[in-house]
Amino acid sequence: MLYFEDLTPGRVFHGGPISATVEEIVDFARRFDPQPFHLDPMAGLQSVFGGLVSSGWHTAALTMRMLADSDLSKISNGLVGLQIDKLIWHQPVRPGDTIRAEFDVMGRKHSQSRPGFGVVTLAWRTFNQHDQLIMSLENAIWVALRPTEG
């Protein structure tokens, strides 16, 4: 189990890889972001992207999956998100891309309102197979302090 005390600034967790398929890109778009350049390769060719691309929200969901599969999933109280800041989609994910993620502990502070908990700030960075940055964000999570014996 991981506790607040284990998440020291500078610690990095890794996730992935995950590959993006045409079928998954289109299925996600059909359900959640039905824009032509996410749904149809021909429409994608006519778009500013020059081909079919994954929704940015699909990229975020894939990155969340990598977070949930990483060692950060061992946080004692689960991955409880409080806030997301500075979400940037640097470039799209295309069919056949293989992505990976890094989750850096940026900082932490004890909770003023909930003794026994702290807030940890993470920087998420998602890269494609060419090590190009495709998405980044900052995320605050709620993490339990290690129990004291008493």
Image (tube, rainbow, N blue to C red):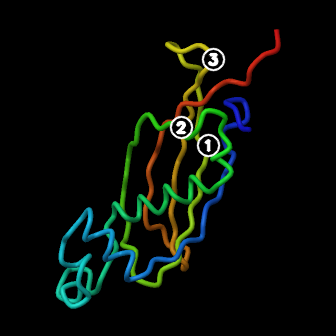
Amino acid type, label 3: Gly
Residue 40 image position (x, y, % from top left): 23, 84
Q: Residue at the spot x=60%, y=30% of the render?
A: 143
From the viewer's perspective, is residue 122 above or below residue 91?
above
Query: Can you identify the residue that label 1 sits on?
Result: 105
The image shows residue 131 at horizontal and vertical percentages of 55, 74
Distance in Å between CA atoms under marks 2 and 3: 17 Å
Left or right of 10, for residue 28: left
Label 1 CA crowd tier, 10 Å (few <14, some 14–19, many 20+)? many
Query: Looking at the image, which residue is at 38% across and 47% down?
Result: 86
Work out which quarter of the rendered image holds the N terminus and state it: top right
* Residue at x 54% of width, y 31% of height: 142
- 59 displayed left or right of 149: left
Q: Position of residue 69 (x, y in %)?
A: 61, 57
Q: Earlier in the sequence, mark 2 or mark 3?
A: 3
Which amino acid type is marked by label 2?
Thr
Q: Are marks 2 and 1 in contact (CB under 8 Å)?
A: yes
Instruction: Residue under label 3, please give it.
Output: 116
In the image: residue 113, left or right of residue 60: right
Relative vertical location of residue 13 with respect to residue 30 in this rendering, above or below: above
Q: Residues within 10 Å of mark 3 (few under 14, many from 20)?
A: some
Looking at this view, is 89 or 16 the one in front? 16
Name the foreground residue: 67 vs 10.
67
**Residue named by callout 2:** 121
